[in-house]
Image (cartoon, rainbow, N blue to C red):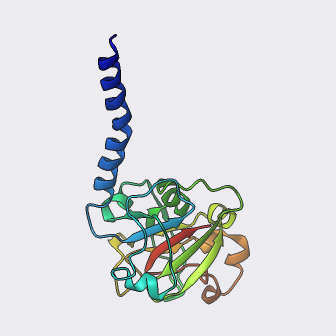
Amino acid sequence: MDKRRFLATAAVAGALPSLAEAASTAKASAGPTLLTVTGMIGKANRGPLDPALDQMMKKQGVQFDKAWAFDWAALSALKAVTIRPTLEYDSNPHTLRGPLLLDVVKAAGALPTGGTRLVLRAVDGYAVTLPEQQARSDRFIVATHLDGKPLPLGGLGPLWAVYDADRVPGMAAKPVQERFGNCPWALYHIEVQ
């Protein structure tokens, strides 16, 4: 093989990962962003916080140099699981469906280490820090559906970090009103620490 052909082949091969990443980025951000994952993530499909356009994040003290933005299609493409907890709002069991929380952060390139913490932030500024071990053992999901219907904005959605408290012995023994303090509804941001 001559030197010129070798260099041309190497240049094309080197560009392929960038082209694949660009295609993935374009696909991942086709619709409006519903969830932004920041912190210790291994890939990005958006740049740093824009203090002019990311007003809610700025006012809530969120800062980042890179992020992974999920739209509805990207979240829906992840494997969904179903849970059926008794909810504090009406003390009735309801069916919730969505991807596992840890699957969402892994899709953003996070590699939970056992000591990883997840800061879950809602649009009203409510935020909780959830240890990775608890997200795993309690099987937290990012719920997108309630009783077969998409979670509405203005209700508990469009996204809700939640688990089946009825299936976690330490929580099932508590009054229903005390089970969901780590479950922000209207979830829009996750920081991986």
Q: Nearer the viewer, residue 88 or 4?
A: 4
Q: Position of residue 176 (x, y in %)?
A: 61, 85
Q: Residue at 65% across / 87% down in the picture? A: 178
Could you tell me which quadrant the C terminus lies in?
bottom right
Could you tell me which quadrant the N terminus lies in?
top left
Residue at the far left in the pictured view = 30
The answer to whether residue 29 is left or right of residue 123 is: left
In the rendered view, tell whether residue 35 sits above or below residue 114.
below
Q: Residue at 29% across / 54% down in the picture? A: 27
Q: Residue at 36% across / 54% down in the picture? A: 77
Q: Where is residue 160 in the image (x, y as percent from the top left)?
A: 46, 75
In the rendered view, tell whether residue 5 sits above or below residue 140.
above
Residue at the far top in the pictured view = 1
Q: Which of 169 and 188 is in front in this view?
A: 188
Number of marks present in the image shown:
0
Q: Which of 84 and 68 is in front in this view?
A: 68
Q: Residue at 66% across / 87% down in the picture? A: 175
Q: Where is residue 184 in the image (x, y as percent from the top left)?
A: 52, 81
Q: Position of residue 162 (x, y in %)?
A: 53, 73
